[in-house]
Amino acid sequence: MLNKKIAILGAGPSGLAQIRAFEAARLAGKKNLPEIICYEKQADLGGMWNYTWRTGLDKNGEPVHGSMYRYLWSNGPKECLEFADYTFDEHFGRAIPSYPPRAVLKDYIMGRIDEEAVSKYIRFECPVRWVEYDKESELFTVTVMNHKTGQQETDTFDYVVVATGHFSTPNMPYFKGLENFPGRVLHAHDFRDALEFKDKDVLMIGSSYSAEDIASQCYKYGAKSITISYRSQPIGYEWPEGIEERPLVTHFEGNTAHFSDGTSKAYDGVMMCTGYLFHFPFLPDDLRLQTHNCLYPEHLYKGIVFQQNPKLIYLGMHDQYFTFNKLDLQAWYARDIMLGDIELPNAEERLADMKVWQDRHQALDGSDDQNIEFQGDYMLDLLAATDYPEFPIKKQGELFKQWLRDKDEDIMGFRERTYASTITNTMATELPKPWLEIKDDSLESFMSLDFVEVTVD
C-alpha cells in the first residue's frame, strides 16, 4: 500500500507547525508516514514573521504576504505564547523581558525549527494557483507556479492543508472624498516604519489591535498627533496627549476629515486599520472556507476539518488570543486525523459537535474574559486527544486577563510589566528603561540591554 501524500500550503507558523507535527511522529518511530510537500510563496520560511520593506507586490509579482512592521513589539506576554516543547529559557539561556520586539520573537520562533529537517519538505517561491478535488479518485490536484523554474507544476495529493493565514488581504473601506485626499492613504498591511509619520498628523480608521498598536508606535517615534476613528465604541484607554479618539469619519474634503459628531481636522496621512478578508483565490467554491474573523469559524469540525470535504484541513483560521501553541495543537490533531490515529466521525456526528461549539460561541457576551476561557477550553479539547506535551492553558488564560488589566492601567507602559513562565516558572526580567525610550529594537541591541532581575517575595 502506497503511503499517503499531503500538500501543505504555506510555510508560516501554521504550516511549520504541521511539518513539525509529522517530524515529531517520525522522531518517535512512527511508521508509514506520508510524503509531504509544502508550497511556500515567499523565498524563506516564517510566513507573516518575514519582515520586508516591500508592499504591494514581491519580486515575482505576487501580492506581498506580510503585514509585519519594523518596530513591532509583542503586544501580549511571551509567557502566553511559549511552546510547550521549547521554552524561552532553552532558547536564550537566560531570562528576558515579557514583551520582546519582533526580531527577538522571530529568533525564538525559528530557534526550535531544524531548518535542514523542515526545508527538505518546502518548495519556495511556489504560490498555489489552483486546487481541485476528484470524487472518483478521492485525490486533490494542486497546481503551483514555480518561480524558480518559470513553469507551472501539478501534483496529486490525498490531503491538502491550507495554512496560508487570514491576515494578509486588506479589508479596505471607502469614504466619500477619499480619492481627493492629497496625503498618504494606506492600509495597516502596508505600514512598515513609524518614522514615516514623524511630525505629521495621522488619522487611523478602526479600533482593532492594529489601530491601538500602530498608534502607539507612531506616538513613540514622533508623530505630531494621532486620531483613532471608531465605528461603534472607542478603545477607551487613557491615551497620552497627542492621541485622541473620535467617532467614525463621514467624508473627506481635501485633507480634512469630517466625523459623525460634527468635528473635523486636517491630516497628513490616513491609515485603514480595518482588518483583513478571508481570501483563498486558489480554491473553488465547494472547497473554499467562507467565514469571518471569529473564535470558532463555521464549517470546520474541531475548528480544523472542512465539513464538506474532511480531507481538506484548515489551520489557524480563528481569531486569536492564544497563538503559536494553539497552532501546534491544531497541527497535532490534524496530523493524527491524516494518519488515522484519530477516527473521524461521520458527517452527522461532526455537525453535532460543531453545533455544541457554535452554540457556546454564540452565547459569549463579547467580554475578553469569556472569550479567553472559550478559546482555552477549545485548546484543552484538542490537547486531550493527542500526544502533544501538556502545558498550563488555564494558567496562561489568567495571564491574558492580567495583560488586559495592565493595558487598561497604562497603555504606554504595559510592556514594562513582567510575568513568570507558566512552564519553567522563570520570572521575566525588567526593561532597563521605559518602552517609549527604547528606539533601537534589533535583536543585537535588545539582547545587549542590561535587563533588571525581578525579585519575587
Image (cartoon, grey):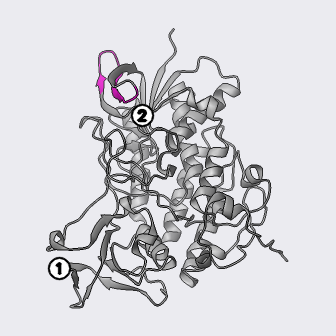
Residue 65: percent from left, percent from top: 39, 48
Main SS class of the magenta portion in the image: strand
Q: Kindly identify the amino acid type of the residue bearing the numbered disc 2.
A: Glu
The boundaries of the magenta stretch are 132-148
Q: Which residue is mark 1?
A: 254
Please give the name of the residue rendered at 47% of the width and 38% of the height, measured from the top-left corner.
Answer: 43
Q: Which mark is residue 123?
A: none
**Residue sitting nearer the eye, 43 or 349:** 43
**Quadrant housing the C terminus:** bottom right
Q: Kindly identify the amino acid type of the residue bearing the numbered disc 1.
A: Gly
Please give the name of the residue rendered at 42% of the width and 34% of the height, measured from the top-left corner.
Answer: 125
Q: Which residue is mark 2?
A: 125
What is the secondary structure assignment of the residue under circle 1? loop
Tell me if label 2 and label 1 are in contact, CB under 8 Å.
no
In the displayed structure, 371 sits above or below 261; it is: above
Residue 431: percent from left, percent from top: 70, 73
The answer for how far apart the CA atoms under marks 2 and 1 are is 41 Å
Please give the name of the residue rendered at 72% of the width and 60% of the height, measured from the top-left corner.
Answer: 422
Q: Quadrant of residue 210?
A: bottom left
Numbered-mark total: 2
Residue 205 visible in the displayed image: yes
In the displayed structure, 280 sits above or below 252; it is: above
Q: Quadrant of residue 441?
A: bottom right
Crowding at mark 1 (Cα within 10 Å: few <14, some 14-19, many 20+): some
What is the secondary structure assignment of the residue under circle 2? loop
Q: Left or right of 129: which side holds 180?
A: left
**Residue sitting nearer the eye, 26 or 50:** 50
Q: Is residue 449 magenta?
A: no
